[in-house]
Image (spheres, rainbow, N blue to C red):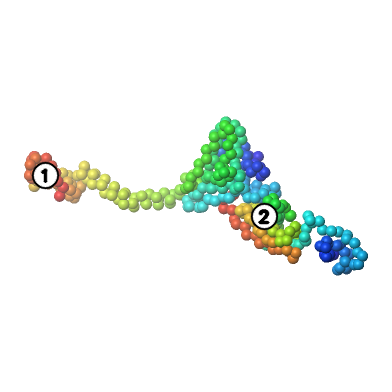
Amino acid sequence: MAIAFDHDNQIISLSSPHTTLLLMQDLIDAIRTEEASEPGLQYAKIADATGKTDIGGGVVSDITITLLNNWQIEHAPGSYQAVLKGGQVVGGLGGNPIKYVAGVQVKLIQSVAGTIVATGSGVTAQDKTDIVNGVWADSNATTLTSDVGFIKNIEGGRWRIVANQMVFYAADNTTEIARFDLKDAAGSPTMTAPYERVRV
Amino acid sequence: MGTCVSTLSGAIVLMPTGYSYPMPSSFVAHQRAPTDPYYFADVDVKNMVVGSRYMLGYDNAGTFTELASGTCSQTDFTIANVPAYANPFLLELRVRKSSTGTKYIPAKSFGYHTASGVTLYVAQAVDEVAM
């Protein structure tokens, strides 16, 4: 049996195929089945579980399993790394849900805002459209668009020096987009020896 | 089948059916041992999800001790002739359902057993996590 229960010692033993990878979904399924079994009924509940709240787009919050009393998970002896995924497991003997087994390194990821994606990315085409529209509607995106347009016009439009000023036009060569006063080294208006420009 | 009659000394005398008091010069046929039940009575169970497995028991010095168990085939049913080993006698009904279909979070119901029986109401919540 891949997930076995020792009620007297309050140990959940893992063996293949759960030796190196244990999903929280598989764990809570096995716990509930054990609790409802004939021998399991004679003992108190093994664990509480929360999570799987639908947050839309086929994505649900991850599972948190709280092992009650002194229950712990024990991996099979060996020299390997084991991973627990799909949520987190807490509780257990002294607040440690994993029993130490020499040679086994258990990678337990405990987060406060994990999610479970049902299939693929879980993001629908409409979600993508909404996200894109939301990004472009942001004030930062609006400013960026305006600034890039200004640069393109400066680089691609008409430049003209007239009446001690430099005038920049848009790419249509007609629409004025910026005007600068030209000054010489002494700060006086000039059209022939500019050292400085000041936007007006 | 006899009728239990308490004597002045506290012993229980089993009398032939039809007698309601000890007859003069009668003898003690049976005396209640400390481990014998105080009485037997029915336990009515209400509102259990069909298909749930249940176990009725009590706390015996820190250990859950089974009195009856089974799988319910209807929401309301009666567990007949449940013994009482104390007075009052606190019963614990454990209810779990993890078979195919909707699963439920393990539930408990408590009630004091009396000579006239007791009714235990069960409130099971759907388990949204287990599959």
Q: Where is residue A197 in the image (x, y as percent from the top left)?
A: 14, 44
**In the rendered image of this protein, does residue A25 appear above or below residue B36?**
above
> Residue, x 67% and y 55% (percent of image)?
B94
How packed mark 1 is, by other alpha carbons closer than 10 Å (few <14, some 14-19, many 20 or more), is many
Depth check: A171 or A143 in front?
A143
Tell me the subunit letter for badge 2. B
Depth check: A36 or A197 in front?
A36
The answer as to whether the residues below labels 1 and 2 share one chain is: no
> Residue, x 62% and y 57% (percent of image)?
B124
The mark closer to the camera, 1 or 2, is 2
What residue would you read off at disc 2? B94
Q: Quadrant of residue B42?
A: bottom right
How far is disc 1 from disc 2 in space, using C-alphas? 91 Å
Q: Position of residue A1 (x, y in %)?
A: 65, 39
Q: As drawn, is A95 to the left or to the right of B76?
A: left
- Asked if residue B10 shows in the view, the reply is yes
Tell me the subunit letter for badge 1. A
Q: Where is residue B91 in the image (x, y as percent from the top left)?
A: 69, 58
Q: Where is residue B76 in the image (x, y as percent from the top left)?
A: 69, 62
What residue would you read off at disc 1? A182
Q: As drawn, is A4 to the left or to the right of A128?
A: right
Q: Identify the element where label 2 is drawn.
A: strand
How packed mark 2 is, by other alpha carbons closer than 10 Å (few <14, some 14-19, many 20 or more), is many
- Asked if residue B76 shows in the view, the reply is no
